[in-house]
Amino acid sequence: MIVADARLLRLSAQFLVKNYDYLWLKTMLHKARTDTSPNPTLITGSSHALNGVQEDQWDNAVNCSMHSQDLYYDLLCVREALRSGRQFSRCIIILGYYIAFQDLSRSMALRKGVISHVYLPIFHDARHWEDPEPSDPWAGFPRQPPAVRTACERAASAQILEYGTYYSPARPRGTFFDFHGRAWHELPEQEQLFFAESRADSHNKSFRYAESLRENAAVLIEYICLLREHGCTPIVVIPPFTRAYNRFVLPGLKEALTAMLDSVPDDFHFADFNDHLDLFCDADFMDTDHMSAQGAKKLSALLAEMFGR
């Protein structure tokens, strides 16, 4: 029995590492539906939410965010979280400026990198991807009986719940760029500007996707309306980005996002922390536009103070 238990633990640890993103989101959605703790806070967003949120700054926060998550999958996460009828006090929607133009299902790379591994197994929804290629979380493992698979998934999910936040020993923080062992604040200004221009340019290119902008405007309206219908206060947040990154953001991205937000008929709270960069320093960032652990704690404490714990 001890040998069997040890084998199961090794297998569940391997399964966790290989399928971390899938397990994270699946576990958080289950927690959102089933946890009975009072005054819950729901959080959605992309990597900016994973990096910028420290859940323990709230009384009870559930972070249903994922790398590259767009507004459509934000909406699917909230639909799933609300399916059980649980009452959330607030929902913090963390957005980048480019999010108004983003559609994972129209990106060849992100279809296979994110949709097939995370969203298809969970939601069975590929949006505009007509012939989706779902990934099997157990691919590459020796064949296991269904009972063993179930036990491994439960053990892996329990481990994620124990971690309490996305970054953990199984998934340590890492920068988008290779800084050769240096922290963002240790880079000379010339290097910061080089990386920031590269990162901002990759986001600025999304500006040409006018059809996605129109569709995302409708998604956001539905999203805010859904929250209001369930008595949940919507809070739209643009997290802080580095001064270097802000220097290269296309003004049209900000203007389009502002127009999209203005088109929402329902009331919601809004905060853009890039209007208050004096609250943050370079050590609060891991790279050009993602927060460090120190920055995540600072931003989360501010959000909890402003909008409630």
Image (spheres, rainbow, N blue to C red):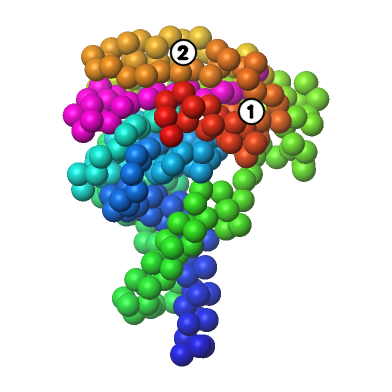
Find numbered disc 2 in the image and state the secondary structure of the residue it sits on.
helix
Tell me where residue 299 appears, x and y as whole percent. 55, 29
Q: Compare marks 2 and 1 and give the one earlier in the sequence.
A: 2
> Residue at 61% across / 57% down in the picture?
169
Q: Amino acid at mark 2?
A: Lys
Q: Amino acid at mark 1?
A: Thr
Per the model, the C-alpha gap separating discs 2 and 1 is: 17 Å
The verdict on residue 102 being magenta is no
Task: Write down the residue under mark 1.
Answer: 288
**Image height check: is 64 above or below 145?**
above
> Residue at 55% across / 12% down in the picture?
275
Quarter of the picture holding the C terminus: top left
Tell me where residue 300 appears, x and y as whole percent. 52, 33
The verdict on residue 225 being magenta is yes
Confirm whether residue 107 shows in the render: no
> Residue at 47% across / 30% down in the picture?
304
> Residue at 59% across / 31% down in the picture?
298
Tell me where residue 286 appears, x and y as whole percent. 65, 35
Asked whether disc 2 touches disc 1, contact meaning CB atoms under 8 Å apart, the reply is: no
**Image height check: is 146 above or below 159?**
below
**Magenta span of residues:** 220-243
**Image height check: is 156 above or below 116?**
below
Task: Write down the residue under mark 2.
Answer: 254
Q: Quadrant of residue 61?
A: top left
Outermost residue, bottom direction? 1
In this picture, residue 172 sits left or right of residue 232: right
Confirm whether residue 86 shows in the render: yes
Find numbered disc 1 in the image and state the secondary structure of the residue it sits on.
loop
